[in-house]
Image (cartoon, helix red, strand yellow):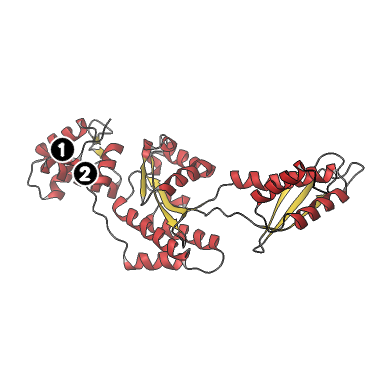
Amino acid sequence: MSITPVSELNDRARDIFRLVVENYLGTGTPVGSRTISQLSGLHLSSASIRNVMQDLEEMGLLAAPHVSAGRLPTEIGLRLFVDGMMQAAEPSEEERRLIERGVGEGGRIEDALASTSAILSGLSACAGMVLVPRREMVLRQFSFVPLGQAGPVGADQALAVLVGADGSVENRIVDLPRGVSPSALIEAGNYISARLSGLTLAQARERLANELARDRAALDEAARGLVERGLASWSADAAERPVLIVRGQANLIDEHASEDLERVRQLLEDLEGKQEISRLMEGAMAASATKIFIGSENKLFSLSGSSVIAAPYRDGDGRVVGVVGVIGPTRLNYARVIPMVDFTAQTLSRLMR
């Protein structure tokens, strides 16, 4: 169903629709004509308001969950409200101060991003999310440490330890081919440290492939396989590992959760997976401004009925390096949260300079 342009609503329908949406977003419950007549100052009878609400329902902008209940906005109605009618409320001085403090906390960039996500969650009453900039680790040193006692055929697994040029240390457990000797582990680690130091993982794999193709890699067959296996363990992990920080999932279980436990369960499952949410957030990296996903507009939320507000942040060269946002029910306070996410993205951009 196409979205009705705001211009096609007359003044009365526009006012009543706006009041229904704003009241629903504030209370989370359907809104009746009597409530609108008491709130609006429109000087219309409940019957007149009901007639307009019925028209809005027929246009696909409102829905009635029960025969005798009031109306609530559909996802199409929420999109119309957000895009054409909402009056944004800029973050307060206190909110700005809290966001800036979280972004400015010392330590690693990941720590600042985690702090930012937690503060955004608390201020928005949603779950806060930050997509961390992808970093290409530069190799400095590499070693294999056998795990367990090496028997006649050697250990079955080893700990691959990678030291980055920035001093960071990461490790992975890798399965070893049968019969690999401790000397082969040492030879493979020494080769990587000596020949591939100063390269990113992608560059290291490319150089290794070139040297193997020209038979210039001074490695025996066992050590050659270990080098390939060790580099591959990081490359696969970097491609598959979630780079999404999520804080405040408990905010998603509010006073209305008991009315829709299946929706909340589905949303928490979506967040637990992270991969699909990460891809959704990555889709916002191409946006020039804050992007809003409402409910089933994105197939990921076709069951959970959730909304995401996401904004890209940039490095000192103006390149988009990550995304910050929140996820919550479709009834979240868009007018307040959208500017808050936008301000957080701007603050993160200043941190990256």
Using the image, determine if residue 59 lies above or below residue 24: above
**Crowd tier of the residue under label 2, counting other residues whose Cα lies within 10 Å: few below 14, some 14–19, many 20 or above:** many
Q: Position of residue 315 (x, y in %)?
A: 47, 60
Q: Does residue 15 appear in this view?
A: yes
| 276, 135: nearer the viewer | 135
Residue type at mark 1? Answer: Glu
Using the image, determine if residue 252 lies above or below residue 301: below
Q: Number of labelled discs?
A: 2
Q: SS of the residue at dot 2? A: helix
Q: Is residue 336 left or right of residue 46?
A: right
Q: Which dot marks residue 65?
A: none
Q: Is residue 107 left or right of residue 39?
A: right
Residue type at mark 2? Answer: Val
Q: Quadrant of residue 34?
A: top left
Q: Earlier in the sequence, mark 1 or mark 2?
A: 1
Name the residue that disc number 2 marks.
20
Q: SS of the residue at dot 1? A: helix
Residue drawn where x is 77% and y is 43% of the image:
214
Q: Does residue 149 appear in this view?
A: no
